[in-house]
Image (cartoon, rainbow, N blue to C red):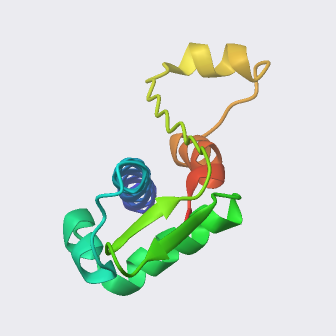
């Protein structure tokens, strides 16, 4: 039973990290749209991450085809053309019967179900 509780705790920690990443990505996008990022160092401070993490976020945005560049004169990242990023997060607690109905009677352990639901959201950048 202790192993199951540890696994559930680990999944909850991963879920919280994923939510933080999504919120950070949303904030980064907003600052880039407003052309108020500042230098990479300033941008890192605004996002409460390291400068290296800022570069990872920028790389991730470029991977999803964000037309982003940095202007050294005005010290900001900006989008060269219109670009919108919609970040929605929905958290819903399901009781055991609801999970069974969704998955045609298949029983899932809580930690396996949560892990499966988080797989596509992890490692954003």
Q: Can residue 90 be seen in this view?
A: yes
From the viewer's perspective, tell me whether residue 24 is left or right of residue 89.
left
Image coords of residue 98 (percent x, y): 59, 14
At x 41% / y 47%, what residue is drawn? 26
From the viewer's perspective, tell me whether residue 112 is left or right of residue 63.
left
When asked about the image quadrant of residue 65, the answer is: bottom right
From the viewer's perspective, tell me whether residue 95 is left or right of residue 51.
right
At x 47% / y 74%, what residue is drawn? 70
| Marker count (numbered) | 0
Question: In the figure, 70 relative to 91: above or below?
Answer: below
Image coords of residue 85 (percent x, y): 55, 42
Name the residue furthest right. Answer: 104
Question: In the figure, 116 relative to 76: above or below?
Answer: above
Name the residue furthest front. Answer: 73
Name the residue furthest bottom. Answer: 52
Image coords of residue 20 (percent x, y): 34, 54
Q: Is residue 123 visible?
A: no
At x 65% / y 37%, what residue is drawn? 108
Q: Give the position of the C terminus as an image quadrant.
A: bottom right
| 3 or 76: nearer the viewer | 76
When asked about the image quadrant of residue 36, the answer is: bottom left
When asked about the image quadrant of residue 73, the answer is: bottom left
Image coords of residue 76 (percent x, y): 36, 69
At x 32% / y 72%, what residue is drawn? 74
Q: Give the position of the N terminus as an image quadrant.
A: bottom left
């Amino acid at each position: 039973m202790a192993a199951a509780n540890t696994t559930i705790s680990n999944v909850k920690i991963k879920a919280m990290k994923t939510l933080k990443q999504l919120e950070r990505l949303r904030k980064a996008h907003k600052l880039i749209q407003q052309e108020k990022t500042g230098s990479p160092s300033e941008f890192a401070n605004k996002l409460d991450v390291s400068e290296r993490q800022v570069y990872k976020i920028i790389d991730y945005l470029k991977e999803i085809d964000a037309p982003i560049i940095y202007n050294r004169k005005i010290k900001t990242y900006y989008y060269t053309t219109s670009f919108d990023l919609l970040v929605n997060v929905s958290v819903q607690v399901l009781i055991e019967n609801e999970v069974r109905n969704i998955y045609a009677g298949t029983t899932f352990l809580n930690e396996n179900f949560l892990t499966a639901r988080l797989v596509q959201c992890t490692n954003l950048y």
